Image (spheres, rainbow, N blue to C red):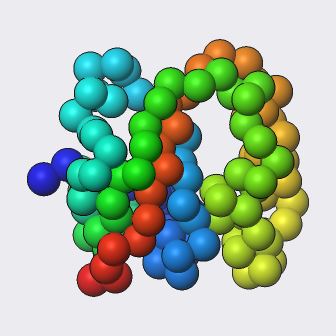
Amino acid sequence: MSYISFAWTTPAVLAGAKTVTRRDWTDRHARQFHAGDVVDAWSKDPRAGGRKVARVRILSIALEPMAWMPDRDYAAEGFDYLHSLDEPGRCRHDFEHWRQSGGEQWVIRFELVEVL
């Protein structure tokens, strides 16, 4: 089964607060994922000792310019939730840095299906 690892944003995924993720994937890797797919969510890459923590359903996947990132995605990326856990500086910095970084990333919108 395909998977997505979430690293330090895992708590927001498990709380249902993170519903979008941006990835610097190759086109070949991104083509493995489709709207409607249910995939495993990992705390970090399984090859790095991560563990399967949930399952998510992909709602959409598209390659988008980083400059298109809407303000509402601050919450959708889970940053509002993580801010409440006392990570405010990191969250705002990452969001603004991403938006201004240029280039394109794969934008995966998803919903939490099950916490394991």
Please state the horizontal and vertical placement of residue 82, each as a whole percent of the image: 70, 72
User: What is the quadrant of residue 92 in the picture?
Assistant: bottom right
Query: Which residue corresponds to the image point at 60% horizontal and 72% vertical from the top-left?
Result: 17
Residue 85 to residue 99: above or below: below
Please state the horizontal and vertical placement of residue 99, each as a whole percent of the image: 78, 33
Please state the horizontal and vertical placement of residue 86, each as a whole percent of the image: 80, 77
Please state the horizontal and vertical placement of residue 91, each as a whole percent of the image: 77, 57
Q: Is residue 97 left or right of residue 47?
A: right
Q: Is residue 104 left or right of residue 74?
A: left
Residue 76 to residue 30: above or below: below
Residue 4 to residue 106: above or below: below
Q: Quadrant of the C terminus?
A: bottom left
Query: Which residue corresponds to the image point at 43% horizontal and 37% vertical from the top-left?
Result: 61
Residue 60 to residue 49: above or below: above
Judge by depth and name the residue closer to the eye, 78 or 63: 63
Query: Which residue corresponds to the image point at 34% horizontal and 82% vertical from the top-left?
Result: 115
Residue 48 in view (yes/no):
no
Marker count (numbered): 0
Judge by depth and name the residue closer to the eye, 51 or 20: 20
Judge by depth and name the residue closer to the eye, 26 or 114: 114
Residue 95 in view (yes/no):
yes
Query: Which residue corresponds to the image point at 65% horizontal and 16% vertical from the top-left?
Result: 103
User: What is the quadrant of residue 5 in the picture?
Assistant: bottom left
Q: Is residue 12 left or right of residue 99?
A: left
Q: Is residue 78 left or right of residue 19?
A: right
Judge by depth and name the residue closer to the eye, 106 or 52: 106
